[in-house]
Amino acid sequence: MVKIDESLRKLAVAKIQDGGSHRQVARELRLCPSSVWKIWVKFQNTGSISDGVRSGRPSKCSERDKRHLCIEAKKAPFLSAREHGESSNIIPKVSVITVRRYLRKSGLFGQVSARKPLLSKWQVKQRLHWCKAYLSYTAADWDRIIFSDECRVSTYHNSRRYVWRPKNSRYKEKYTCKTVKYGGKSILVWGAIRFDGNRILIKCPPRLDSSEYQQVLNKGLPEVYESHMTFMQDGAPCHRSSSTSKFLDNKQVCLLSDWPAQSPDLNIIENMWAELKKRLNKHHPIPKEDLWEVIKKEWYAIPNDYVTRLYESLPRRIHNVIKNKGLHSKY
């Protein structure tokens, strides 16, 4: 149905008021006579020629049905909109678009789920206890802690990448992102950082046992460790073995021994690994023979200010974990 412009309606009313008939005005303005008649009747009854408020098509679902759908979506957040619509026995059969619209209006949006380690009840309790114990730490206290960890870096990174391309060219060789199974050639590296930006990165054997880990520490710790500092490491088996503990005691290394399990959100060196891999994506793919050199170059190119900001975030991380009662934080 063609909508008649408001100026045309005003003209039709004016011509009828001047004495013109409905049929004559319709012929002059090239309108349907019934349309001119409806415009005139509406003007006589309401004094207006504008469209009134319309109720629109009635909803198939009541407000109660919509609330029930949102409750079910909160109980099972990983089901798709189609699955919620098909599994519900209360709401009538509606389209997937309608289900999505109801969920969005209630504040539920389809988002990519964050990947976090699985936590047991004991680990949640341990994380909460640790954060409360270190809640009183000042910036000077955190500055004395050296954070360390291992990371595996591959020549290929299968993360999502964006490309500028024309339409209908998704599968052209130029615009496709190349992937390989298991990430191609990879290197295991060990790193440690200090509050002032000083850091160390060492290439490790493909599989790291206690004796090899001690060789890495023997090479890397003197570069960053000082007698007034505390060394942090997570609970990997090669870190917690009796031989490694004895090695650290002989080296007179003060160890942060109560680090909670499954806590990458508290270990700020994890952000360094993420920043490193982000920088390595610019070289994607990296030739096998150049991988180690590129890793070293990008590791030491990360600004010292970035490391300082990570240390400054530690109190906020602890508060966030306490607020979440030991569960995952946003970091």
Image (cartoon, rainbow, N blue to C red):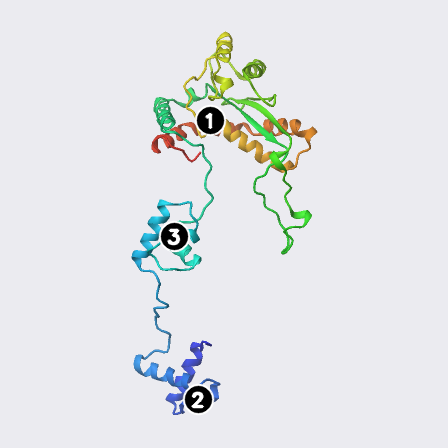
- Residue identifier under label 2: 25
| Residue displayed at 38% across by 55% down | 102
Direction from residue 144 to residue 154 in the image, left or right: right
Type of the residue with mark 1? Asn
| Residue displayed at 60% across by 26% down | 300
Type of the residue with mark 2? Val
Direction from residue 313 to residue 75 in the image, left or right: left
Type of the residue with mark 3? Ser
Q: What percent of the width, then of the height, locates residue 104?
A: 40, 53
* Depth check, front residue: 253 or 150: 150
Say which label, 2 or 3, has the lower sequence index. 2
Instruction: Kindly give the residue lying farthest to the top in the view shown.
Output: 250
- Residue identifier under label 1: 267
* Depth check, front residue: 211 or 164: 211
Disc 2 to disc 3, how far (Cα)? 58 Å
Label number found at residue 87: 3
> Which image quadrant: the C terminus?
top left
State which mark lies toward you, 1 or 3. 3
Badge 1 vs badge 3, beta-carbon distance below 8 Å:
no
State which mark lies toward you, 2 or 1. 1
* Residue 141 quadrant: top left
**Callout 1: few (<14), some (14-19), or many (20+) C-alpha neighbours within 10 Å?**
many
